[in-house]
Amino acid sequence: MNQYFEMGGYAFYVWSSVGLALIVFAWNVVAPALQRRSLLQQMAAATDEGGELENMQ
Amino acid sequence: MWTWFHRLASPPSFYQFSEIVSPWVLLSALGLLGYGLFAGLWMAPPDYQQGDAFRIIYVHVPAAALSLSLYTGMAVAGIIALIWRMKLAESAIAALAPVGASFTALALLTGMLWGKPMWGAWWKWDARLTSELVLLFLYLGIIGLNSAFVDRRAAARACALLAIVGAVNVPIVKYSVDWWNSLHQASTILKFGKPTITPEMGIPLYISLAGSYLLAGYAVLRRMQNELLLRERRANWVSKLLSEQKQP
């Protein structure tokens, strides 16, 4: 088992690559969801005030 | 068929369509990625030359393939946006850029992590590596340009133009290993003729490729939805959606 995680001496390179990939995968799932939540909140706030939202990115 | 396509291209229908489709896209992406990575990291035999270091292929190749595919998609969306002023194509440009940039960065970083033990250097100013770095800068340029405009339509037109001009870099990245004497190895699977990889190593790679493409597709759909919400915030369908959300 331990020998498996050692990756024939390449553990650092292989597992860092896998770790970075998991970070990028997770970011691609989470970031659009966060963006949507803040967008909906801003839009709801703007309609409550009857105002217009400017400079919204 | 044509009317169906036409209706789907309207922002509210596309929004609804993505709302239904994207959870399934995400689910299949995670399933395929989970299996592909497990099979690649655990079950595939070590390479006869590179040992276990070759396993980086299972994250590096999908990321690199996506970096080019997403850019090509963005340039095509740019052409459609410039010629037909189609709203969906305009929002696709804005949605594709950050997803593409993330996978380009991943391709470069995993490439460095693969290059160090195999070539003895993190980085070389080699044709493949340099053109991939240029690709990252193109993506970042488009993201920056997009956020520099308040008017979404003007932003989309400017980004479309940059995306189309930058598309000359795509074939350079793809064929750099054939055109120049590159340190980077030539493609093992994405080429004409028989793949030079054994099925035990190849099948997990195809599965993680499919999973990565679906995951990127999910992110693009979700980002397009956001872009449409922002652009159409004064339209009836968006206010309806907002009022529906307020009453739980």
Image (tube, rainbow, N blue to C red):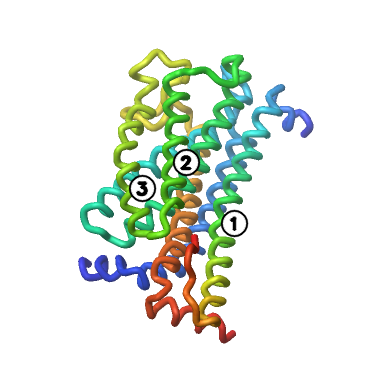
Quadrant for the N terminus of chain B, please.
bottom left
Place of residue B148 in the rendered image (x, y in percent of width and height, measured from the top left): 44, 51
Q: Are marks 2 and 1 in contact (CB under 8 Å)?
A: no
Mark 3 neighbour class, 10 Å CA radius: few under 14, some 14 to 19, many 20 or more: many
Amino acid type of the residue that numbered disc 2 sits on in the rendered structure: Leu
Q: Which mark is residue A30?
A: 1
Q: Which residue is mark 3?
A: B159
* Chain under numbered label 3: B
Viewer can see residue B200: no
Q: Are dots 3 and 2 on a single chain?
A: yes
> In this rendering, would B47 be left or right of B237?
right
**Element type where label 1 sits in the image:** helix
Task: Give left or right: position of B73 versus A35.
Answer: left
Residue nearest the observer in this picture, B89 or B178:
B89
Image point 70% across, 28% down: which residue?
Answer: A12
Image quadrant where one finds the C terminus of chain B: bottom right
